[in-house]
Image: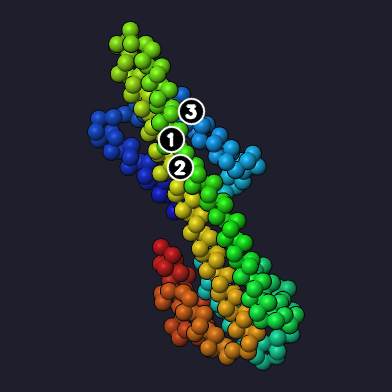
Amino acid sequence: MSSPIGLALALILILVGMMLKGGTIAGIISPAAFLMVVGGTLGVMVASTGLKSIPHMVRLFVGPGIKDPPEERPETINNLIGFAEKARREGLLALENHAREIENPFLKKGVRLVVDGTDPELVKDILETEIDEIETRHDRNQEIFRNGGAFAPTIGILATVLSLVGVLQHLDRPATLGPEISAAFLATFYGVFMANCFLYPVANHLRRRTEAEVSNMVLVVEGVLSIQSGDNPRVLAQKLWSFVPPAMRPSDEAGASTPTPDAVRAEAA
């Protein structure tokens, strides 16, 4: 889970740098500024996307927003090669029983379309339309956090201005001006930190997951169409393995075996 690790590392190093410059952790704690920035940012995010977005934001953050995307391409390629070999030996109808056991819903849909004798152009159009719609839905999810990242610094500046207005109304207390002005500027810090160390990273992480999912779906489209056209399994293997980096390919690139977990983890890293 790279997102929590990265966010924690950023926070720790920022705090360490601040303390090296003579600051203290207590000096950057301001419940009032935190409430204004976080509450204001969440408020405008909800205003932009609707009340239903609140539980959706939570689900995105605790799930795909922080978890690394799984690497499914090697398994998908091996499944497609196995289907191609069976279809070449026994015909496309032989895949009907296997289609029920497929866990990947997109792959299952593609195999069923082929088994049903759907025209290849229609198969391609149906699958590519689903890819486009998934990208659109995922982009809306990313936009929630991108909008929050754009709002947060501005909300922080607004909160700072409001705090400074309150400070200037009490110029008759010079002994407290320093701490009060310092506390006022914390709102700007909270806004910039929330945007660049939380909201934008979550949006970028969601984009990475979308790219990984779409990459796997493109493999399925290529494989399903090749199976339908009766391509040689070895030719199909060479075509599909070209979609993944060399470190993740089997030594013979024939699809007879899946890359080792170490190779997959090394490539993902």
Find the distance from the CA under tag 1 to the CA under tag 3: 12 Å
Q: Which amino acid does label 3 sit on?
A: Met
Name the element at disc 3: helix
Name which of mark 1 and mark 3 comes first in the sequence: 3
Q: Are marks 1 and 3 in contact (CB under 8 Å)?
A: no
Q: Are marks 2 and 1 in contact (CB under 8 Å)?
A: yes
| Circle count | 3
The residue labelled by disc 3 is: 36
Label 2 environment density (alpha carbons within 10 Å; few <14, some 14–19, many ≥20): some
Quadrant housing the C terminus: bottom left
Q: Which amino acid does label 1 sit on?
A: Thr
In the image, what residue occupies the spot 57% across and 78% down? 222
Q: Is residue 67 visible?
A: no
Name the element at disc 2: helix
Name the element at disc 1: helix
In the image, what residue occupies the spot 40% across and 26% down? 160
Where's residue 261, x and y in %? 47, 70
Where's residue 251, x and y in %? 43, 83
**3 or 2: mark nearer the eye:** 2
Find the distance from the CA under tag 3 to the CA under tag 2: 16 Å
* Mark drawn on residue 154: 1
Above or below for 1 versus 211: above
Residue closest to the eye, 244 or 46: 46
Label 3 environment density (alpha carbons within 10 Å; few <14, some 14–19, many ≥20): many
Q: Do the residues labelled 3 and 2 touch (CB within 8 Å)?
A: no
* Mark drawn on residue 150: 2
Q: Which amino acid does label 2 sit on?
A: Ala
